[in-house]
Image (spheres, helix red, strand yellow):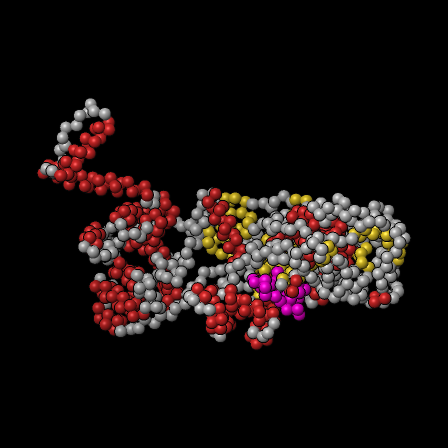
């Protein structure tokens, strides 16, 4: 021990501290033999204290027991089918008995010949490795148990070449030997060791490199895989076959040395080629990959809150998905989207659409300049002209760019309207290609599928399906001197129409007039109440035609509110979580239904939407798919056929589909891009198969009476037949104030732009003076605009307003 000079204990503390430091410095400059001896004796004590201090920072025995019994979480459908497994890595655990003995022999011979003799550490080998490391010769000295410690606890132990890491690794290996048997250590090691290409464990490695199972590996294949463990990238048999061959032969030599392989076979075996049969092993996605990815995020948070490990605690998650409906949804979406892709490819063909003159070529030029390759060329100093010319002339680049930009996408969702249970969820055409979820993540303009909110708000406000309007051109002041003129594909017919027909035939001119009656604030409020609760709705008049982007999940849930008598139930995906022993950890119930609109208005609106399927834009459900069940729905198409929508309601199931391109600058063709042609077939085929398989009862009926929206008006508002001149002879009139006029439409036949003859119109109209227009920032109903009102009603007059609105982009649907 170093003898310091005497310390005066009567001195103040700071003074004593200076004396101690001075004495230690003196002792180090002038050591004595006794001091050196005490110093050397203190080294192991200090080392022991350091080791003891590190013990709390290594995995506990309890942690090791949990790791020993680790079991990934399993996700099941409502009918008990496995949807996916949440494991930490892409591995398939196999028992030691199902692993080729050649693998075990090669591992022990190469990595740890005294594996069965030591208790976690090979002291002689560890000391030798430490001496070589001090001399600058890096040498591994870890046993199989120490390597397992690193594999099991990479964060706690790490892989840095430090003394601290080696001590923590040694402590953990001793603990492992106390908990695991030797065979369990081997089994765990071989099932957790990484082999590149997202393959963990010997089973996945055998499939990846040799297209066989672990129990069928021969001695050469076993030696190749075990040889990789020294450096998986360096000895990768796919990219570095010569190194892998040399390393394999080294492993064979060690097997001979340790008497695990007959020496007379070595020479012949070394001459054999590798014979790698490589195939990357992708994780099992299951039938609903987008759904399970959404569920994974939820389960991570749930497990953290409840102190569970979703990768190791063997949780069993029971979901609402019906595996039969999920398969039907997958097949319907894939089949119909493939057909549409063929049409899209023809529209965007290299010669006719991609490089020809016109708007598509201009869009193609934009895509080239938006590409990472173009930006990299500009950054490297090339001119715009040179960069563009080189890329445009690269056939491979241009073909890939076209395929990426013009790959059609789709989303599909089905749920039970009574309890919100999600029954089927398809987020894209192919999860491997497009992991973006078009059910819950994508926000797209809903087009005419948003119109039911407008008509629902009107019905809640006292309007009735027989209320009369004129299908005529509408000019709506934008507030800046310009006008918005919402129109339909075939132009206005000039004929009187009812509110019901406005929705059945998806007439933009009628919808705009209805929107003027109720105002955007009420429409947005109803949409939120019914289920559009995550997306922002712009409270402008053009909202009536679906200009605010929303998700498919919100829209399908909102339509479910209609079926549920106007009561909203949030979508639900999990019913219960069980532990590994089958005990229920937490059960979940459907949320209490919230009243979004009156039952009377909901039933009236739903019955109007029966007409969409029976005679309107959704008639293909009956004619093409032969569905005779009690159903109602709505199509939707946004401007230039950018988005196609269709949602169909059944008493037991509501399903909707969206179709479009990820880049909304790419649009669908006029022949096939409308919702009735693009999205409706997916929903139609799905329902057709669900009814055929009797998963859905074709005899089920809505609570809304059939024909409710076709009831006659009250006495005093007598309907008149539609005799008279052809449509072209109808001319605008400006009758004097207070007079009653009769408007006549064509006799028989369908007016221009209509799908079928309209029923009787209510045309007895009285012209009243105009009232002051409302302030721009007030709801439309607070101060009535100039109007025409129906004569002869018993109730308050129904208003047919002069329209005013401020609108961004307009959507249309024939």
Magenta stretch: give its range: 658-686
Q: Position of residue 423 (x, y in %)?
A: 59, 55
Q: Residue at x 47, y 55 (%)?
A: 85
Residue sitting at the far left: 33
The verdict on residue 682 being magenta is yes
Q: Position of residue 402 (x, y in %)?
A: 53, 70
Q: Residue at x 39, y 68 (%)?
A: 278
Residue 621 relative to residue 591: left or right: right
Residue sitting at the far top: 10
Residue 781 makes an appearance in the image: no
Residue sitting at the far bottom: 351
Count the marks.
Answer: 0
Res 762 → quadrant: bottom right
User: In this orientation, which residue lies closer to the viewer: 250 or 43?
Assistant: 43
- Residue 22, compared with residue 87, is above or below; it is above
Residue 401 makes an appearance in the image: yes
Residue 55 relative to residue 327: left or right: left
Quadrant showing the C terminus = bottom right
Residue 394 relative to residue 535: left or right: left
Residue 644 relative to residue 176: left or right: right
Q: Residue at x 49, y 63 (%)?
A: 432
Q: Position of residue 378 (x, y in %)?
A: 45, 66
User: In this orientation, which residue lies closer to the viewer: 358 or 167?
Assistant: 358
The verdict on residue 652 being magenta is no
Q: Position of residue 338 (x, y in %)?
A: 58, 69
Q: Residue at x 66, y 69 (%)?
A: 670
Quadrant showing the N terminus = top left
């Amino acid at each position: 021990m170093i003898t310091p000079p005497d310390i005066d204990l009567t001195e103040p503390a700071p003074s004593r501290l200076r004396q101690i430091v001075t004495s230690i410095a003196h002792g180090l400059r002038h050591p004595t033999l006794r001091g050196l001896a005490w110093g050397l004796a203190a080294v192991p004590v200090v080392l022991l204290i350091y080791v003891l201090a590190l013990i709390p920072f290594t995995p506990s025995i309890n942690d090791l027991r949990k790791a020993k019994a680790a079991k990934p979480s399993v996700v099941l459908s409502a009918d008990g089918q496995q949807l996916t497994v949440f494991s930490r890595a892409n591995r398939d655990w196999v028992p030691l008995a199902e692993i080729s003995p050649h693998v075990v022999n090669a591992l022990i011979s190469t990595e740890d010949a005294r594996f069965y003799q030591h208790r976690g550490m090979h002291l002689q080998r560890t000391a030798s490795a430490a001496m070589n490391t001090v001399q600058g010769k890096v040498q591994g000295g870890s046993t199989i148990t120490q390597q397992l410690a690193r594999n099991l606890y990479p964060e706690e132990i790490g892989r840095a070449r430090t003394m601290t890491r080696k001590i923590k690794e040694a402590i953990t290996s001793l603990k492992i030997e106390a908990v695991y048997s030797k065979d369990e250590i081997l089994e765990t090691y071989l099932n957790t060791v990484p082999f590149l290409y997202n393959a963990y464990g010997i089973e996945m490695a055998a499939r990846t490199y040799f297209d066989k199972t672990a129990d069928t590996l021969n001695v050469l294949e076993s030696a190749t895989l075990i040889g990789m463990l020294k450096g998986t990238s360096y000895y990768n048999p796919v990219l570095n076959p010569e190194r892998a061959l040399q390393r394999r032969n080294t492993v064979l030599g060690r097997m001979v040395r340790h008497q695990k392989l007959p020496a007379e076979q070595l020479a012949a075996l070394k001459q054999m080629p590798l014979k790698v049969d490589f195939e990357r092993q992708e994780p099992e996605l299951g039938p609903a990959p987008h759904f399970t990815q959404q569920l994974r995020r939820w389960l991570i948070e749930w497990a953290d809150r409840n102190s569970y490990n979703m990768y190791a605690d063997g949780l069993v998650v029971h979901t609402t998905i019906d595996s039969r409906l999920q398969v039907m949804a997958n097949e319907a979406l894939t089949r119909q989207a493939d057909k549409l892709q063929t049409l899209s490819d023809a529209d965007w063909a290299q010669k006719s659409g991609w490089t020809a003159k016109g708007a598509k070529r201009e869009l193609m030029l934009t895509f080239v300049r938006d590409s990472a390759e173009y930006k990299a060329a500009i950054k490297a100093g090339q001119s715009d002209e040179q960069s563009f010319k080189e890329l445009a002339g690269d056939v491979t680049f241009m073909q890939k760019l076209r395929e990426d930009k013009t790959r059609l996408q789709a989303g599909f969702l089905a749920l039970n309207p009574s309890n919100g249970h999600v029954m089927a969820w398809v987020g894209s055409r192919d999860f491997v290609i497009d992991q973006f979820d078009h059910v819950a993540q994508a926000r797209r303009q809903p087009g005419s599928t948003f119109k039911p909110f407008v008509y629902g708000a009107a019905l809640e406000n006292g309007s009735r399906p027989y209320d009369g309007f004129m299908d005529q051109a509408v000019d709506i002041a934008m507030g800046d001197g310009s006008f918005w003129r919402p129109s339909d594909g075939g132009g206005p017919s000039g004929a009187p129409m009812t509110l019901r027909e406005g929705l059945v035939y998806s007439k933009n001119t009628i919808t705009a007039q209805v929107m003027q009656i109720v105002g955007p604030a009420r429409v947005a409020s109803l949409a939120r109440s019914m289920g559009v609760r995550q997306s922002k709705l712009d409270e402008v008049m053009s909202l009536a035609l679906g200009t605010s982007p929303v998700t498919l999940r919100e829209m399908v849930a909102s339509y479910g509110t209609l079926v549920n008598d106007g009561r909203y139930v949030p979508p639900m995906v999990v019913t219960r979580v069980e532990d590994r022993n089958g005990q229920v950890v937490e059960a979940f119930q459907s949320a209490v239904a919230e009243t979004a609109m009156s039952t009377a208005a909901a039933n009236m609106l739903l019955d109007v939407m029966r007409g969409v399927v029976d005679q309107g834009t959704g008639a293909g459900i009956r004619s093409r798919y032969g569905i005779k069940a009690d159903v109602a729905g709505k199509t939707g198409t946004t401007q230039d056929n950018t988005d196609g929508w269709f949602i169909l309601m059944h008493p037991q199931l509501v399903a909707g589909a969206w179709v479009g391109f990820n880049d909304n600058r790419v649009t669908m063709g006029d022949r096939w891009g409308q919702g009735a042609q693009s999205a409706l077939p997916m929903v139609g085929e799905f329902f057709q198969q669900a009814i055929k398989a009797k998963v859905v009862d074709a005899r089920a009926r809505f609570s809304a009476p059939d024909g409710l929206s076709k009831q006659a008006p009250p006495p005093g508002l007598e309907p008149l037949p539609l005799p008279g001149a052809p449509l072209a002879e109808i001319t605008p009139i400006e009758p004097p104030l207070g007079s009653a006029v009769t408007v006549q439409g064509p006799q028989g036949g369908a007016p221009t732009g209509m799908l079928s003859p309209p029923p009787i119109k209510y045309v007895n109209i009285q012209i009243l003076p105009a009232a002051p227009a409302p302030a721009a920032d007030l709801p439309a109903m607070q101060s009535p605009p100039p109007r025409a009102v129906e004569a002869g009603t018993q109730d308050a007059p129904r208003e047919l307003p002069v329209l005013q609105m401020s609108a961004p982009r307009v959507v249309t649907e024939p």
